Amino acid sequence: MIIEKFVLTPFQQNTRVVACADTRRAICIDPGEDSAEIESFLKVNDFELQAITLTHGHFDHIGGTADLHQRFPHAEIFLHKEDEDFYYGLPAQPLFLGIPQNQLKILGFEYETPPKLTRNWADGEIYEVGNLRFKILHCPGHTRGHVVLAEETQKAVFVGDCLFEGSIGRTDLPGGNFQQLMDSINLKILTLGDDFTVYSGHGRETTIGHEKRTNPFLTGLNQISRGKFI
Ligand SMILES: [Fe+2]
């Protein structure tokens, strides 16, 4: 498995190209903004972009979908149904965060409605990229339709904005729910195994074991106060 990270948008969002080293088939997880760099990386390495795979519908994770799809029109686009409102409502999303209309263009947040989704993710499905097999796990809490992509043989999980090194995703935006997020993390992500590398939507890579030991949201006291010490 080959992973290339592109840090994009003023939010320092991690866009990643993940490719099967044997077959050269690739996906782009969460293209955050328009990027000629992603296209040249794919072309120089002779990767075939088979899909744009979205963890959730926030604008810093989907803002480059239209541009990337224009560069690779055969790439399919996947998102969970519960985040479709965010996706098709992309042009208005920055306004909800309080960014003034007259600042959108300057900040790079002026969007068109993105292209039609190919289909929605189904919880538990296996999505194949060459010899890689990603298990799609619905993990609501940061948004209603957030998913993570877990590749078990490579011990890698792409968690979007569910979990970060030392922190967790915010739950104060529309569709956010703290209890749901904690359940998603505890029941679906942490159970993958301590040796999984965690690829987050912002910040550095970490491991599940490291987060279990050190993340203040996941360590003993916090879990006891929730009545769920695991
Ligand atoms: Fe987000």
Image (cartoon, rainbow, N blue to C red):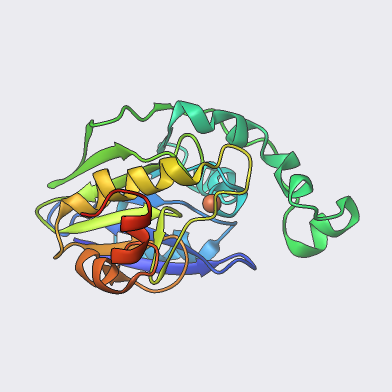
Identity of the residue furthest to the right in this view? 102
- Left or right: 167, with 116 as reference point: left
Q: Residue at x 52, y 33 (%)?
A: 83
**Residue 138 figure quarter:** top left
Q: Residue at x 72, y 54 (%)?
A: 109
**Residue 197 figure quarter:** bottom left
* Residue 189 screen position, x and y as percent: 26, 50
Check the image and report above or below for 199 versus 174: below
The foreground one among 185 and 222 is 222
Q: Is residue 24 visible?
A: no
**Residue 57 figure quarter:** top right
The quadrant of the rendering that contains the C terminus is: bottom left
- Left or right: 170, with 44 as reference point: right
The foreground one among 200 and 51 is 200
The quadrant of the rendering that contains the N terminus is: bottom left
* Residue 38 screen position, x and y as percent: 46, 62
* Residue 167 screen position, x and y as percent: 43, 66
The foreground one among 84 and 215 is 215
Q: Is residue 96 visible?
A: yes
Check the image and report above or below for 74 versus 221: above
Label total for image: 0
- Left or right: 66, with 190 as reference point: right
